[in-house]
Image (cartoon, rainbow, N blue to C red):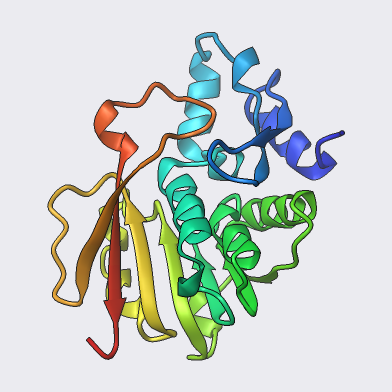
Amino acid sequence: MNAPLDLQHALSELLGDAQLVPCPLPGTELQLWLIDGDNMDRAFSPEETRRILHEPPYWSFCWASGLAVARYLAEHPQWVAGKRVLDFGAGSGVAGIAAVKAGALEVVACDLDPLALAACRANARLNAVELSYSTDFFAEADRFDLILVADVLYDRANLPLLDAFLSRGREALVADSRVRDFSHPLYRRLEMLEAMTLPDLAEPEEFRHVSLYHASRNA
């Protein structure tokens, strides 16, 4: 199976020898187009490092929080079954695809990065599901039952979005493994989930512990 040309071209511009391959996600029935980590066991050049830091290809990884959400929705489909869902900061689209598989009525993958939305489209095809797409969360109507958010809070500048999520959805599920001092009056932690980033970035053990938070307008 050949990788989508637009995504492979974008990745090759960042990392000349990087290849996208379809990767099964452990503990799920899903697969995603991800960087072939088995063939990237080398040191990056200074120029590659600069490019990765300047414009990281988030969409070519399955981050631990996204994998944790995918597994959680498979085990607890009642969160999304028959509901309208928006996957915020969708990246690879893993959370949104998992929501469709768990019975969501509609899923909108929302991301500012056009390459991320291209990855969502490719991954939706790979998993034989249909998504809708959006580049502007705030242009969406207040019509969603649930906002899914996985691995977005790594940038503390995004913390104010926690209030915004409930402006477009009745409830929000937020998965994060980065913020250790999380405190928000509307959000409570439901569970601690275990997952890892794929391909394996040899991240510290603490980043494999994913907190799942819930907020509701009616709380």
Q: In which quarter of the image is the N terminus?
A: top right
- Residue 16: image quadrant is top right
Farthest top residue in view: 42
Left or right of 19: which side holds 50?
Answer: left
x and y, in percent, of residue 42 in the image: 54, 8
Q: Which of 17 and 22 is in front in this view?
A: 22
Q: Which residue is drawn at 76% across and 35% down?
A: 8
Above or below, 216 relative to 49? below
Tell me which corner region of the image, top left, top right, bottom left or bottom right, holds residue 163. Answer: bottom left
Quarter of the image with the C terminus in it: bottom left
Query: Residue drawn 67% across and 55% down?
Result: 120
Pinpoint residue 112: horizontal percent, then vertical percent: 55, 62
Left or right relative to 61: residue 176: left
User: Looking at the image, how many numbered discs can be counted on the residues?
Assistant: 0
Is any atom of residue 89 visible in this view? Answer: no
Image location (x, y in percent) of residue 69: 45, 54
Q: Please, is residue 181 above or below residue 219 in the view?
A: above
- At 35% from the left and 26% from the top, the residue drawn is 203
Q: In this view, does 77 lie to the left or right of 93?
A: left
Residue drawn at x 59%, y 81% is 82
Where residue 55 sits in the image (x, y, percent)?
52, 41
Asked if residue 137 can be seen in this view, the reply is: yes
